[in-house]
Amino acid sequence: MKTIKYSLTIIVFSILLFSCNKTVDDTILPDDNTGSLSQVSVDKDFNWQSALSGTLNITFQNPHNVSTEQEIINIINRDGEIISRTKIVDGKASFNVILPQNAQYYIYFPVTGDQLEISEIKDLVMELGKTNMFKESRLINDYSSCTSCNNPMENAGAELPTINSGYTITHEDNVPGWETNANDNKIEIWKDGFNGVPAQEGNQFFELNANSVADLFQELCLEPGSSVTWSVWHRGRSGVDVAEVKIGSSVGTAQTMAVMTDGTSAWGYYTGTYQVPEDQTTTYFVFSSVSSAGANSYGNFLDNFEIECDFDGDGTPDDIDDAPTDPTISYISAFPTSGKQIVAFEDLWPSLGDFDFNDLCMSNQAVINKDADFNIVSADFKVSIDAIGAGIHNGIGMMLYDGNGNALPANVIESITGDVVPDPNNANGLILSEDVYQTIEDFYQNNGHGPTNSTPDTIYFGINFNSGVLDFLPELYLFRTNDASHEVHRSIFPGTSQMNTSLFNTLDDNGNFQTANGIPWGIEIILDGHYSSPREKVEISEAYPEFLQWAQSGGTENIHWYETPIESKVLDIR
C-alpha cells in the first residue's frame, strides 16, 4: 500500500507533476498545455456538474377542464417507467430533479395521457388533451379496481344526462348510477359556467339541494374486507353551504366520514379511507345536505367523485401506491432522480494536483421512501468506491441539505442503519469512512497496481427521517484521516462546522474550492451508464478530449463529454 505524508515537499512535488511530463504505464506523454486545465479560465459561477438539475415548475393549459387539483403527475423515462411523482396543488406542480443528460425523460399526466419532454430545467406549460383529448370515460366511470363489480362508481362527474345549457332537474331514472330519497325523486344538474359557476371537472356538476333537502347516493358492490380511498369536491352556491359524506351498508345507517363546508369562491376537496366490513356485500355512498345559505332548494354543489382501491389504508390508491401493502410508504423515488451520481476529487487542496480527478471517485445512489403526504420516511444508500489515485489517506463524509442546497433543521435524522456513524461535530452529517484504505478490501489504484475490472467496494447504509422532511440533497466530501478539519468539497458547497477555514485563500485556492481561473477540486457527473476514471496522472482533459470545451462553455457544449474517453487513458473498475 502506498502512503505519502502530507508535507511542503509533497505539495511542491505535486505541483511539479502537474506541470511536467506525465507517464501512463511507462509511456511518456508530451507536454500539451493548450489542452490543459491550467491554461484555461472558466466562469466562476459554473457548478461543474454534468446534469439536468434544478426545480421544474409546471402549469397547465386546460381547454377540456380536466381536474388537475390534487392529482398525481409523474416523471417517466423513455420506457414509460415512473421515476418520480408529485401532487398538483393550486394548479401547478414542482419537481426538484437531478437527471442524466444522456437519457430522455418526460412529464406525464396519467389522467389524459399527455406527456412533455424534459429538455432543460425551466418553467414548463403542459397542454392537457393535446395527445389523447380528454378521456370521457374518466367522467363517466373509470374506476375498476378491487371491487366485485368492475366499476364501483358510475357517472362520477355528473356528465349524464347531457344538458345543453343552464341546469336541469330530472327524475333519478335519467341519471345513471345515482338515486335520491327526495319525495319527487328529482336530481339537479348544472352546466359548466351557469350563473358563473365552473364545473370542478368536465362539463357538468350536481346541486345536492334540488327541489327539497334530500340525500344523493349511489349503491356500490365493494369487495367485503377491502379498503378504499374516496374523494369528492364541494362548493357553496349563495354563501357557505354544509354537507356530509356518509358511507355504510344502507342509506339510513351510513356513518359520517366528513363534513364539507365551503363558500362560493372555490371548490373544496375532501378525501378519506373506508374499510369495508367483511360481511358487507353492498355499500352506499351518501351525500346529505346539512345547511345552505339560500332556500332549501339552493346549494351544495358536488362534482368529481372518486373511489379507488387502497389495500393498505394509507390514503393512496393502489394504482399510484409504489408500496401498496405497506401503510407507512406510498411513493418511492431516488437520488439522483434517475441514473447515478459520480463525484470525483483532487485531494491536494488548497494546492494544485494533477487534475486527473481520481484521488477518490465515488458513485452514489439512494432509494427514497415517502408517505402519502410526500414526507420522506427513509432512504437507503449505496456508495461505491470506484477509483483511488491518492497517496494521502482520506475519509469520506456526507452532509444532508434541502433540495436547494440550504441547511436542514438539526433534527431531521431519526436513526441510521449500516456501518456509517453520525458525525458528532455536524448536525445532519455522517461519517462513511475514517480512512478509505481501511474501508476497502482490495487495493486498486488508477496507476495499474492492484485488481482492475472488478466490483468496487460499496458502503451500504440507511437513514430513517423524522417527520416533515420533503426533500434532501446529499453531499459527499473528503477529509484528511489525520486531520478531519482539512476538508475538500465541491465548489457549490461550504465546508462543515469542523473545517479549518484558515486554509481558504491560501496556496492555489481562491476562497471557494476553486482556483483563480475557476478550476475546482471536485466535479459531479449524473449519468445513465458507466464512467471510467482517468488513469493516475492523466489529466481529465487528456482522457476526455471533449471535457475542456464543456467546461469553458459553462456546461452548454459537449454535454455528453464523459461518453467519449480515450480508452488507453482511463481505467475501468466496475
Image (cartoon, helix red, strand yellow):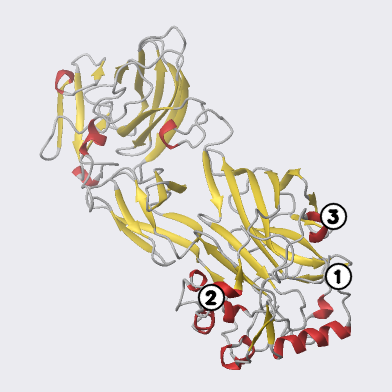
Callout 1: helix, strand or loop?
Answer: loop
- State the residue at coordinates (57%, 88%): 35
Q: Are marks 3 and 1 in contact (CB under 8 Å)?
A: no
Q: Which residue is drawn at 82% across and 88% down?
A: 12
In the image, farthest residue toward the top: 279
Work out whether residue 48 can be spotted: no
The residue that mark 2 highlights is: 566
Instruction: For marks 2 and 3, give the one nearer the viewer.
Output: 2
Q: Position of residue 113 (x, y in %)?
A: 29, 46
Amino acid bearing label 3: Pro
Label 2, residues with CA under 10 Å away: few <14, some 14-19, many ≥20: few
The extreme front residue here reads 26
Q: Mark 1 points at which residue?
A: 3
Expressed as whole percent of the image width and height from the top left, the position of residue 404 reads: 58, 63
**Whether label 1 touches label 2, CB < 8 Å:** no
Residue 33 visible in the snapshot: yes
Q: To which quarter of the image does residue 327 belong?
A: top right
Q: Vertically, is 400 above or below 380?
A: below
Q: Name the residue under label 3.
A: 424
* Mark pair 2, 3: CA separation: 43 Å
The answer to whether residue 486 is left or right of residue 260 is right
Looking at the image, residue 7 lies above or below residue 280 = below
Q: Please tell me in which quadrant of the rendered image residue 307 appears.
A: top left
